[in-house]
Image (cartoon, helix red, strand yellow):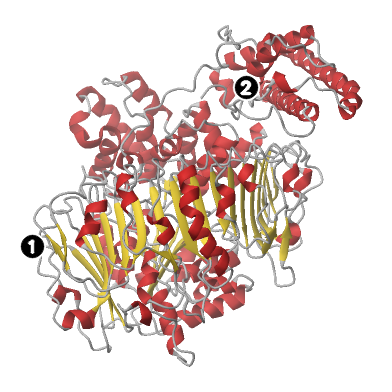
């Protein structure tokens, strides 16, 4: 990308290009400007930029007072100049925001119409322009007075190239397995995991009482890695499970709500108005007499553990709790002050550290890929890393050879830069030195992207998809660039959380030491100002270009008056609705993120004036009350992302006119016929209800095919449910007959997920076979036959397939050796598992997920034939109607013995799957206590899996790690619950993540 906005230079490069375009235009300049004035401004800014870029790197990374002060002055000047020209072009265009887009930020074709308002603005425009020129002259004079001469004269042709040329190319097309730490960081943890599993005694029937095991160790030793591996390997064996990450100042309401959501408590969404004690009571009630597994990561105080532990009931159901902490007193509190239950995680030994280092740097070549003369330096590096996996991975990221022969001097320089304290005293201070070293070596554009992560509070799980959209909206990266997120992962500056079936990391979190560095650097560069109700203001009391308001559970917090907020470009707010600042006052916003809580006394949040923010490109709102949007939003002509997670009063009537909109997530009040004009739309996610507004849903289903034919750029279509509980209706789904014919089908469609209680096809539609890029398909059909297999088996990219079949198959479903070459995950919900996989079928299938009626199998159906699935590593089954508690474990009865010995997870469900569609209905009115049990059955959502496997490396015994997203769903057919869910978890916000 040319001319990206950066933390150190701001929008300087883009501004210079805009000035050059205006100067070179054949059109006359608007009044208030002169050709000579534009030229002088451009030349003055070019000189400042060349001096700034030419300063020694050490001065830019660690400047003293004078260069730091001057650098900030030039950067703020660039921001103010760009804001000035944007405002001028907006006023000249009559408030429509012309000239603000990235592609044509300063169009000269819209600046010549003279309106009365423009005439009134002309004197002020000239005055402001003169003020900018004076500031440029002052900055140039100070540059000379301070003797800030660059090391090397740098002269950029700003009319033909960016201020720094093109964004540097990165080795970003690495396999995901080499980017994430899933495989690397598991080196050396096999033995500790075995000991920890023995201590947890998962399968010991003699230890039925609740057991709490804290993992204690220094920062960077791998506590979270081990805990997450244990969670993924054994979590599926429990009735309820949750993994939550704490912070140093946690929002307990958010944290407990996350637990409530993950343990699948019936009607978890109904608790959005609950206080902390109510949430504790709800968790206790749901976990009563259940076997659960809870991981509480990164505990800092015993008082926080005391609150969390009050929500986790004792019992004799073999429940387990795993905590991690680097504070010994907290570990003691978690263990009940019985030190024998504390698991001390030690640093890696020399051999393990060596393997981790070589795996990270040389990949599959391991140590053989390292030149002999380098190994002496490697030994010194490994010793200095002190056996800490995080520091080892951080340093290894600096040494990835960009050429076949790495530079020996570079390795020696890195080794000499490392602190020696980690070897003898692996403390946080030593780790901070390593993190600073890695940060200083980041390219400028990666530093900018990393600093923006500081918009999120500590402990958040951050969606990769959301983060990359925000980078684009802020002009840090362009749409065409991919890999910056993965590059930050590879360098250990962010840590992976969720991974999809492609092996792609979907979300991340930030180590508290990295976050501290981010906040410090953001303060130095005035990049982000963070307002925290506990820590006051983290940043200069100055113009805020990006503002992160983290009020948490405070109900009366305020923004300090010393902060100048009129120039804010990105606003993140997390807290109660009464503390939200006046959004229309932020006239320069590009990015707006609102995570809002409200109590029952406030039932709506007003965003009706959002249409005035004409620069907006990204809007995300998560709210537990109704959001009031404006009737019309045509002013948001540059909006690319609109995501509303919550109820809305109405959809703007002109939403179909937002031609630049690419990502849309709304409740189903939207009329899909209005969306046909969104020619650039790539992602459409509608949250629907089969209880309320059913007529609108039926109409949308009728017209959806017509709309899809127009959305030629669509990549993802998802229809999900509000999932309220309980549901007193027999209506479970809408016919998808109107979608049976789509011509032409969206050629770029990669993901199609239509949940079964929203819509159901008579059979698989024929047009699916044309989707060559489709990798994820989740649909429901009334009938499924061998002819349907022919429709999808030839899809070359299909990786995950989930089918809900309403009627029992009339014949055995046979999967032959042809097709499904890319399929890794196959889920089938059907009353009778009449399946046969012939030799060579689904060669890359790793996981088979089945839901079926045990009674149908017991009455004549043959076993499931899976012995020919050569790559199968795991089978999961929900066996419906399994009967009494004394029923023996069942899956082995119905699946022939497999010499590959895949992992088997089965769950018995005491409910009936009805093949007859007329008998699919809500529970009886007087079902009584069975309602809650049914809700627990139906609210499990199992898609999609966490996979941390690298084909080139040995994996843990589990075969692969998986992560299942969970969200409540409707009562009715219990097998519908497994079809829902998404391949990623939204990070903790105000409500279920």
**Residue in the foreground of this view, choosing between 755 and 379:** 755
Q: Give the left or right position of residue 104, taking residue 229 as reference.
A: right
Q: Give the left or right position of residue 427, taking residue 962 as reference.
A: right
**Residue in the foreground of this view, choosing between 847 and 453:** 847
Above or below for 836 versus 529 = below
Q: Quadrant of residue 540?
A: top right
- Report helix, strand or loop for mark 2: helix
Residue 457 visible from this viewpoint: no
- Report helix, strand or loop for mark 1: loop
State which tag comes first along the sequence, 1 or 2. Answer: 2
Tell me the residue that label 2 is attached to.
14
The residue under the point 57% across, 22% down is 3
Q: Position of residue 62 (x, y in %)?
A: 58, 26
Q: Residues within 10 Å of mark 2 (few under 14, many from 20)?
A: many
Circle number at residue 459: none
Circle 1/circle 2 CB separation < 8 Å: no
The residue under the point 56% across, 41% down is 470
Q: Residues within 10 Å of mark 1 (few under 14, many from 20)?
A: few
Q: Position of residue 201 (x, y in %)?
A: 28, 73
The residue under the point 20% across, 33% down is 365
Q: Position of residue 675 (x, y in %)?
A: 56, 48
The residue under the point 60% across, 41% down is 519
Tell me the residue that label 1 is attached to.
899
Above or below for 569 versus 686 = above
């Amino acid at each position: 990308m040319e001319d990206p906005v950066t933390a150190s230079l701001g929008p300087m490069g883009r501004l210079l290009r805009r000035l050059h375009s205006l100067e070179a235009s054949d059109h006359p300049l608007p009044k208030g400007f002169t050709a000579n004035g534009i030229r002088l401004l451009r030349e003055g800014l070019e000189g400042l930029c060349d001096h700034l870029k030419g300063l020694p790197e050490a001065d830019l990374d660690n400047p003293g007072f004078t260069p730091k002060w001057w650098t900030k002055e030039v950067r703020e000047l660039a921001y103010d100049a760009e804001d000035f020209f944007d405002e001028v072009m907006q006023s000249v265009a009559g408030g429509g925001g012309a000239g603000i887009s990235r592609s044509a930020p300063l169009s000269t074709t819209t600046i010549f119409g003279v309106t009365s308002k423009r005439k009134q603005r002309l004197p002020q425009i000239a005055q402001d322009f003169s003020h900018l020129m004076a500031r440029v002259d002052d900055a140039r004079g100070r540059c000379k007075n301070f003797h800030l001469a660059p090391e090397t004269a740098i002269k950029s042709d700003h009319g033909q190239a960016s201020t720094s040329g093109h964004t540097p190319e990165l080795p970003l097309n690495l396999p995901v397995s080499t980017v994430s730490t899933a495989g690397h960081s598991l080196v050396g943890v096999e033995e500790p995991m075995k000991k920890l599993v023995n201590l947890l005694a998962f399968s010991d029937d003699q230890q039925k009482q609740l057991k709490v095991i804290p993992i204690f160790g220094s920062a960077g030793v791998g506590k979270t890695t081990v805990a997450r591996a244990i969670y993924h390997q054994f979590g599926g064996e429990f009735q309820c499970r949750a993994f939550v990450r704490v912070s140093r100042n946690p929002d307990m309401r958010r944290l407990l709500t996350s637990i409530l959501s993950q343990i699948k408590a019936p009607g978890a969404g109904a608790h959005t108005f609950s206080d902390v004690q109510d949430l504790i009571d709800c968790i206790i009630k749901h976990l009563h007499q259940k076997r659960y597994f809870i991981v509480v990561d990164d505990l800092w105080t015993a008082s926080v553990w005391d609150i969390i532990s009050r929500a986790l009931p004792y019992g004799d159901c073999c429940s387990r709790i795993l905590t991690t902490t680097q504070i010994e007193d907290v570990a003691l509190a978690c263990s009940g002050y019985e030190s024998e239950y504390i698991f001390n995680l030690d640093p890696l030994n020399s051999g393990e550290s060596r393997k981790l280092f070589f795996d990270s740097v040389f990949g599959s070549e391991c140590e053989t890929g390292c030149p002999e003369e380098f190994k002496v330096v490697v030994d010194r590096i490994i010793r200095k890393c002190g056996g800490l996996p995080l520091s080892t991975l951080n340093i290894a990221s600096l040494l990835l050879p960009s050429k076949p022969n790495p530079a020996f001097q570079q390795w020696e320089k890195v080794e000499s830069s490392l602190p020696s304290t980690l070897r003898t005293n692996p403390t946080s201070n030593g780790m901070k030195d390593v993190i600073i070293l890695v940060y200083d070596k980041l390219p400028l554009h990666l530093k900018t992207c990393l600093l923006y992560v500081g918009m999120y509070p500590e402990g958040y799980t951050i969606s990769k998809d959301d983060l990359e959209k925000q980078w684009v909206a802020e002009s840090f990266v362009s749409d065409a660039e991919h890999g910056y997120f993965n590059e930050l992962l590879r360098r250990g500056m962010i840590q992976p959380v969720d991974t999809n079936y492609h092996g792609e990391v979907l979300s991340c979190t930030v180590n508290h030491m990295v976050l501290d560095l981010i906040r410090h650097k953001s303060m130095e560069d005035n990049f982000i100002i963070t307002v925290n109700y506990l820590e006051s203001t983290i940043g200069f009391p100055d113009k805020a270009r990006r503002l992160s308001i983290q009020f948490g559970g405070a109900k009366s917090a305020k923004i300090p008056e010393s902060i100048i907020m009129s120039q804010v470009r990105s606003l993140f707010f997390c807290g109660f609705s009464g503390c939200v600042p006046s959004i229309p006052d932020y006239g320069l916003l590009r990015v707006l993120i609102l995570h809002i809580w409200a109590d029952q006394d406030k039932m709506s949040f007003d965003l009706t004036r959002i249409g005035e923010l004409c620069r907006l490109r990204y809007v995300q709102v998560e709210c537990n009350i109704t959001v009031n949007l404006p009737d019309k939003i045509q002013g948001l002509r540059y909006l690319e992302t609109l995501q509303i997670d919550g109820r809305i009063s109405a959809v703007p009537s002109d939403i179909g006119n937002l031609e630049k909109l690419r990502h849309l997530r709304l409740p189903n009040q939207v009329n899909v016929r209005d969306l046909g004009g969104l020619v650039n739309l790539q992602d459409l996610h509608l949250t629907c209800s089969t209880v309320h507004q059913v007529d609108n849903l039926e109409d949308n289903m009728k017209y959806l095919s017509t709309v899809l034919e127009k959305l030629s750029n669509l990549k993802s279509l998802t229809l999900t449910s509000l999932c309220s509980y309980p549901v007193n209706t027999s209506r479970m789904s809408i016919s998808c007959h109107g979608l049976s014919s789509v011509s032409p089908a969206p050629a770029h469609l990669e993901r199609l997920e239509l949940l079964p209680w929203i819509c159901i096809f008579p059979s698989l539609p024929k047009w699916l076979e044309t989707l060559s890029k489709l990798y994820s398909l989740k649909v429901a059909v009334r009938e499924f036959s061998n002819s349907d297999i022919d429709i999808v088996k030839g899809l070359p990219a299909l990786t995950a397939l989930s089918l809900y079949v309403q009627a029992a198959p009339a014949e055995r479903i046979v999967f032959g050796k042809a097709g499904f070459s890319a399929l890794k995950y196959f889920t089938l919900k059907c009353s009778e598992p009449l399946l046969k996989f012939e030799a060579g079928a689904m060669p890359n299938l790793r996981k088979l997920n089945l839901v079926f009626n045990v009674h149908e199998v017991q009455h004549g159906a043959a076993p499931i034939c899976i012995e020919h699935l050569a790559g199968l590593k795991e089978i999961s089954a929900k066996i419906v109607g399994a009967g009494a508690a004394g029923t023996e474990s069942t899956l082995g009865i119905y699946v022939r013995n497999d010499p590959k010995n895949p992992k088997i997870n089965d769950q018995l469900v005491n409910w009936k799957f009805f093949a007859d569609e007329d008998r699919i209905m809500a529970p009886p009115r007087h079902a009584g206590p069975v309602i809650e049990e049914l809700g627990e059955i139906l609210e499990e959502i199992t898609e999609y899996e966490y996979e941390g496997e690298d084909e080139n490396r040995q994996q843990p015994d589990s075969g692969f790690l998986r992560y299942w997203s969970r969200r409540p769903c409707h009562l009715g057919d219990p097998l519908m619950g497994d079809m829902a869910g998404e391949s990623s978890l939204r990070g903790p916000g105000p409500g279920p993540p």
